[in-house]
Image (tube, grey):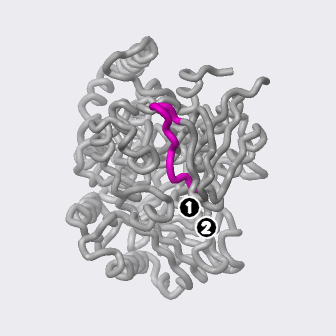
Amino acid sequence: MTKRSSVLVIGAGHNGIVCSNYLAKAGYQVEVLEAQSAVGGGAATFEFADGFWAPGLINAPYGLNKKIYKDLGLRPRGSKTSEELNCIALDRDGNHLILNRFGLTGGEVSEKDINSYRIFRKEFTNYSKVLDPLMVDRPPRLKDMDRKDKFTLIRLGWNLRFGLRTGSMREFLRVGGINMYDVLNEYFDNPRLKAALAVDAVMGQRMGPRTPNTVLTYIQRIWAETQASTRLPTSKDILEELYDSAVSRGVNFRLDSKVTRIIVDEGQAAGVLLESGEKVSASIVISNADIKTTFLKLVGTQDLDAMFCHRIDNIRSEGNVAKIFLAVSKLPQFRNLEQKNFRHRLLIAPDQRYIEHAFNCVKYGECSDKPVLEITIPSLVDPTLAQTGFHVVSISAIYAPHNPNKGWTALKTVFLDNILSSIEQYAPGFVESVVAKKILTPADVEEQYNNLGGHWHHGELSLDQSFMMRPVYGASQYDTPIQGLYLCGAGTHPGGGMTGVPGHNAAKRVLELAGSA
C-alpha cells in the first residue's frame, strides 16, 4: 500500500492509540508523542510505593466498544475470559446488596424492588440504544447541516419513534432531562439500591443525584457498558492489546516526548515543537490532550478567533474525584461478604441523601467528611500489582474539589483519614492493615497527567457539553478551526471512559476529510 501523509498524535492514552490504529490501518504514517515514560495516559499503571503498583485512574473498565474490537481484530489475551462486573452496595451490618445487569440479590430487598429493577434495566437499556446513531460517529451539526448530519438525525428520530413503544418514547422524553434522584424514587424503595444507581450517574461528574441531566449521564454509562465487547478485568489488558495492534501496523511511539506547542502556519497545522526543542513536521496533527490545553496552551490564542477562545475558556472541566491507592497486608474483612465478591465494585453510599450531602461540600470548595467511595482490589485479578502476600486497594472518592478553600496541603491528610475511617466502619481492622498509601487529588491529576482541571472526562458531561455541543460549537466534529488539526480525547463526543469511541470517531473524521486509502 502506498503510504499517505504523516500524522502526529499527541498523547498515548487509549483514545490516541485507537485513533492511530485506524489511521495506520488506512495507510497513514503515524507517530504518537507521549509526555510520560509509558503509554496509557490516565489508565497506565504506575508504582505508588516500593513494590506496589496503581492500576491507573479508572477503577472499573467495561472494555472497548465492540465495533473497535471487530474493526481492529483485537482478542483478549491469554486465558482471560469475560467476567460480569457486579456492583456491591455495602452495608455496615452485612446486608450487602449485589447488582448486575440481570437482577439483584441480598440486601433484604423486596420483591417489588427486584421486579422494578428488571423493568428499570430493560427500559434504560432501550433508552441507551436510541442514542446509537449519535455515538459511534461524529455528532450532527444543527446549523449548515450536510447530508450525513441530516441522515444521523433521521436515524435518531427513527430509533425514537419505532425503537421504543409509544409509552416508552414518552417516558424517555419525560425523564431525559431531569434528575436521577426523582426517577429512582419513582421506581424503588430500597435506599442502598437507589444510591448504587445514583453513583453510576454522578461518578466523575460535578453533579449530585438532584442535579438536572443526571438521567442522561446514567443513560450514557449504560450505553458504554452494554456496547462493550468484553469485560476485561483491568485497563492494563486493554492498553496492551491496543499498543501491540498499533505497533504491528507500523505506528511509532515516542515516549518522554512532551509537546509544548502545535506549529500553525497560516491557519494550517504543520507539526509540533517538543520540550527538547525538536520540531516534528506533519500535515495532520491529532490531539488527545484535554481541550483547554490543546487550544489555550499548545495552539495559543494568537491563531484562534476571540469568541472561540472564550467558549473554550468557559468549558467546565474542574475535577471532583480523588484517587487513593493503598497497599494492605491482608484483604479487608467486610462483614458477611464472601471473598469471591472482592473482585467486583464495592460501594459505600448508604442512600441518595448521603451522596447529595457529599456533593454539597464541593460546591463550597470543601472536602466531604463522609465521601462516597468506589472500591476495587485489582491485585486479586493482577497479582503483579502487589508484593507477595499483600494486596492493592484502589478507591475513587467523591467529592473532592479541584481547588479547596484551605488548599490541599492542609486537607490531604484529613480527607484521607476520613476515607480510611469510613472503610473501617464496614471492615473492622482495615486501617491496621494499611502499609502504604497514595492520594491523587484533582490538582494532582492535573499536574501528573497534564490535564487542566484534573477532570476524568476532560469536561463535564452535562447536556450543554454533550453530543453536538461537545466540546464547543466550532470543534464538535473532531476537526477544528485550524486546518489539519483534529481532536480525539475524552473532551470530545461521546466523552470519557475506556470505550475508545472518541478515538474511533476522530479517525473516521480524518479519513472523511483527508481521504481514505
- Dividing the picture into quadrants, the one containing residue 385 is bottom right
Query: Which region of the structure is painted magenta?
Result: 258-269
- In this view, the residue in front, 307 or 91, is 307
Residue at image position (51%, 53%) is 260
Going by the image, does 59 lie left or right of 199? right
Label 2 neighbour load within 10 Å: few <14, some 14-19, many 20+: few
Q: Quadrant of the C terminus?
A: top right
Label 1 neighbour load within 10 Å: few <14, some 14-19, many 20+: many
| Amino acid carrying mark 1 in the image | Gly
Q: Pinpoint residue 237: horizontal percent, then vertical percent.
A: 67, 53
- Dividing the picture into quadrants, the one containing residue 341 is bottom right
- Residue at mark 2: 46
| Amino acid carrying mark 2 in the image | Phe
Q: Quadrant of the N terminus?
A: top right
- Residue at mark 1: 56
Magenta segment includes 268: yes
Helix, strand or loop: magenta stretch: strand
